[in-house]
Image: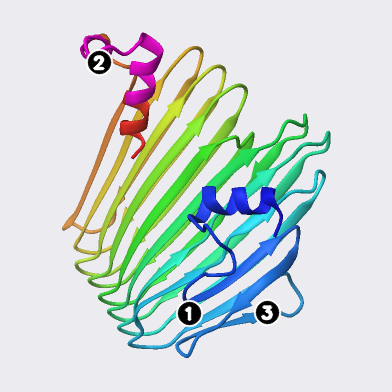
C-alpha cells in the first residue's frame, strides 16, 4: 500500500494500518481488490456479471464489524460498484464503507457505489459512510452513492453519512422501507466549498405499525458552492417520522431544502424542521474573547456543528 492509499484510508475509514484490520474487510483501490478477509460469521463473496460483492452476516452475530473502503488514485477512472448486505436475524454489527478520491490529473474521476441492505428481524446495524477528495489536478472528484435499506420487523439501522471535503460533485440517493417496529436513524453531514455541488435525496417509507424514522441533515456551503436536500417521508401506518435540515451558508454559498411529508394513515405522525442561515455574530464574538481570530472562531463553530 502506498502513502496516498494509506492517507485516504485514514480519512474515510480510520484505518491506520491496512495490514492489521480486525474482522471482515475488503479494500478496493483503483477498481481492484487489494485485500480481503472473511470471518466465521461474515462472508464476503465477489459478484458475477457486475462489479461488487455480496456480504452475508449470519443470524445472531454480535459485536463484529465489516470494513469495505474504496480508494481511487488514477485520474480519469470511472467505476460503478454494487454491494449487497444480507444481515441475519438478531445480528448486531458495524459496517464501515466510504470512498476517497485523490485526483492529480486533468480528467474526472468518479465512483458510483450502490449499497443495498437487507436487515433481518430484530437485527441492528450501524453503517458509517465517509466521502473525501484530495489532489491538485483540475479533474473533478465525483461520488454518486445510492443506499437502499429494507428493514424487517423490529430491526434498527443507524446511519452516519459524511462528506468531509474535496468532493466536486455528488448526487446522493437514499431509499428506506420499514416494516412494523423498525427504526431508522440517519445523521448526514455535508461540507462544500469552491464551486462544488451536492444533491441529497431521501425517500423513506414507513409501512408497518410502530415504524420510526429520524433523518437529520447538517450542511455547510462555503464560497460559491450549492447544496440541495430533498427529504421525503411517507407514513403508511401508525408510525412516527421526523426530518430536519440544519445548515449554514457562508460567502456566496446556497442551500435549498425541499421537505415532503405524506401521511396515508390517520395515526401517522410526521414532522419536518428546517433552519438555514449564516453563523450568528454573537457566537463569533464569544470565541474571539478567548483569543481566537474571526477566521479561527468560524472554523471552531463549523467543526462543532458538523460533529
Residue 248: horizontal and vertical position, in percent?
Answer: 37, 24
Above or below 195: residue 293? above
117 with respect to 28 (left or right): left
Which of disc 1 and disc 3 is earlier in sequence?
3
Q: Quadrant of the N terminus?
A: bottom right
Mark 1 surroundings: few (<14), some (14-19) or many (≥20) residues within 10 A? some
Label 3 sits on residue: 46
Residue drawn at point x = 75 percent, y = 62 percent: 31
Q: CA distance from mark 2 to mark 1?
A: 47 Å
Label 1 sits on residue: 86
Check residue 134 for magenta coloring.
Answer: no
When asked about the image quadrant of residue 75, the answer is: top right
Label 2 sits on residue: 287
Where are the magenta residues, as a range?
A: 283-300
Can residue 53 be seen?
yes
- Asked whether 12 or 7 is in front, the reply is 7
- Residue 101 is labelled as none
Figure disc tally:
3
Q: Secondary structure at mark 1?
A: strand
Q: Nearer the viewer, mark 2 or mark 1?
A: 2
Amino acid at each position: 500500500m502506498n502513502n496516498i492509499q494509506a492517507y485516504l484510508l485514514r480519512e474515510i475509514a480510520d484505518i491506520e494500518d491496512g495490514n492489521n484490520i480486525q474482522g471482515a474487510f475488503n479494500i478496493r483501490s483503483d477498481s481492484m481488490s487489494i485485500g480481503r478477509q472473511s470471518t466465521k460469521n461474515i462472508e464476503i463473496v465477489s459478484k458475477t456479471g457486475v462489479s461488487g460483492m455480496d456480504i452475508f452476516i449470519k443470524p445472531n452475530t454480535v459485536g463484529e464489524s465489516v470494513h469495505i473502503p474504496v480508494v481511487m488514485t488514477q485520474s480519469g477512472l470511472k467505476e460503478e460498484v454494487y454491494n449487497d448486505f444480507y444481515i441475519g436475524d438478531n445480528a448486531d454489527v458495524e459496517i464501515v464503507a466510504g470512498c476517497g478520491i485523490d485526483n492529480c490529473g486533468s480528467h474526472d474521476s468518479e465512483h458510483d457505489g450502490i449499497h443495498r441492505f437487507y436487515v433481518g428481524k430484530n437485527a441492528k446495524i450501524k453503517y458509517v459512510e465517509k466521502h473525501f477528495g484530495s489532489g491538485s489536478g483540475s479533474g473533478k472528484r465525483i461520488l454518486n452513492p445510492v443506499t437502499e435499506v429494507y428493514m424487517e420487523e423490529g430491526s434498527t439501522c443507524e446511519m452516519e453519512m459524511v462528506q468531509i471535503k474535496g468532493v466536486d460533485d455528488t448526487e446522493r440517493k437514499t431509499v428506506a422501507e420499514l416494516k412494523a417496529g423498525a427504526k431508522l436513524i440517519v445523521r448526514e453531514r455535508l461540507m462544500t466549498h469552491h464551486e462544488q455541488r451536492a444533491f441529497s435525496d431521501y425517500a423513506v417509507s414507513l409501512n408497518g405499525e410502530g415504524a420510526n424514522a429520524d433523518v437529520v441533515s447538517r450542511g455547510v456551503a462555503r464560497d460559491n458552492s450549492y447544496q440541495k436536500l430533498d427529504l421525503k417521508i411517507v407514513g403508511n401506518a401508525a408510525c412516527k417520522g421526523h426530518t430536519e435540515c440544519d445548515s449554514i451558508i457562508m460567502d456566496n454559498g446556497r442551500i435549498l431544502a425541499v421537505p415532503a411529508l405524506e401521511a396515508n394513515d390517520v395515526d401517522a405522525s410526521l414532522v419536518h424542521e428546517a433552519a438555514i442561515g449564516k453563523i450568528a455574530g454573537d457566537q463569533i464574538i464569544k470565541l474571539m474573547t478567548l483569543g481566537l481570530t474571526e477566521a479561527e472562531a468560524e472554523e471552531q463553530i463549523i467543526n462543532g456543528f458538523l460533529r
